[in-house]
Amino acid sequence: MTSQTELHKTDIVAPARLDTQASIHELLVNRRSPRAFSEQRIEPAKLLSLLEAARWSPSSANEQPWRFIVATKDDSRVFSVLTESLVEGNRRWAERAPLLILALTQSTYTKTGTPYRHSWYDLGQSIALLSVQASALGLAVHQMGGFDAEKARQLLSIPEGFEPVVVFAVGYPDQPATLPEHLQKREVAPRSRKLLQDFVYTEEWGKPSSHLQTQSSLLTPPSTN
């Protein structure tokens, strides 16, 4: 029997990914940040899998500075707080997602009390691993910097020494038609990134690295006779 999730995935239009310059894993190819989320609940085992992926992220001195406040719609008070903390442009679509997570990081090293300069970087790594795991499970993640960190701090009693960094929505992607009209075109627009030549250097700053001249046979179409 075909599951609801399998049916759902076949109906979603994923924007094309442009300018791929080398072969990358399918999970990275498929990763995207949609705004159109289904209200379908995330299975508890899948939610646990996402958090476990974040748990095994690398960090400076193995400090593991990340903290997550997790809210499904069953956690109505916390979900409402996270929704209300978002700027209006994010709230209009994110409140439909079945899961919102506030990601925080600690400001100092536990053992020394010295400033933890790389804590944001380490938090970002943990969310990156969570995002790839989400792709593996047919889920998507959309991260939002547009939220009121102080409002979240006050309403969720976040202690000093921990900084709210980002709120992210998690769920199964849905049809762009579920979005406000002005967001529908953005949802299906082709995705692109800067070329590798724009940010990878070796010999001197601003000069593309010679390592980028390697040709990927996996991207070269086979010759025909």
Image: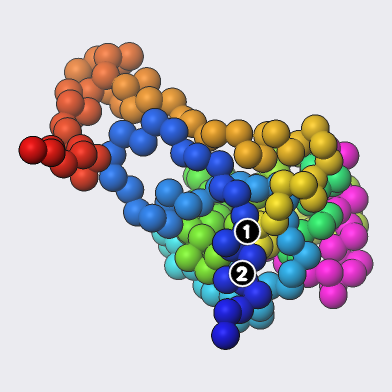
* Contact, mark 2 vs mark 1 (Cβ under 8 Å): yes
Q: Is residue 111 left or right of residue 172?
A: left
Task: Compare residues 99 and 120 and report the one nearer the observer.
Answer: 99
Query: Looking at the rendering, in which quadrant would you find the C terminus?
Result: top left
The magenta region covers: 66-89
What is the distance, in whole Å, between disc 2 and disc 1 at their CAs? 7 Å
Residue depicted at 33% across the width and 14% down the height: 206
Mark number, residue 7 = 2
71 is within the stretch colored magenta: yes
Which amino acid type is shown beneath numbered disc 1?
A: Asp
Where in the figure is residue 5, as x and y percent of width and height? 62, 71
Q: Secondary structure at mark 2?
A: helix
Q: Nearer the viewer, residue 152 or 179?
A: 179
When the figure is inspected, residue 47 is found, relative to residue 104, above or below; the finding is below
Total labels drawn: 2
Quarter of the figure with residue 49:
bottom right
210 is within the stretch colored magenta: no
Q: Position of residue 72 (x, y in %)?
A: 78, 69
Rendered residue at 43%/57% (across/down): 27
For numbered disc 1, what is the local secondary structure?
Answer: helix
Quarter of the picture holding the N terminus: bottom right
Q: Is residue 24 visible?
A: yes
Q: Position of residue 98 (x, y in %)?
A: 76, 65
What residue is disc 1 on? 11
Residue positioned most to the bottom: 1
Instruction: Please give left or right for residue 35 compared with residue 221 in the image.
Output: right
Q: Position of residue 76 (x, y in %)?
A: 89, 69
Give the residue at the far left of this rendering.
225
Residue type at mark 2?
A: Leu
Q: Residues within 10 Å of mark 1 (few under 14, many from 20)?
A: few
Residue under the point 75% across and 54% down = 160
User: Which of the 4 quarters of the picture holds residue 38?
Assistant: bottom right
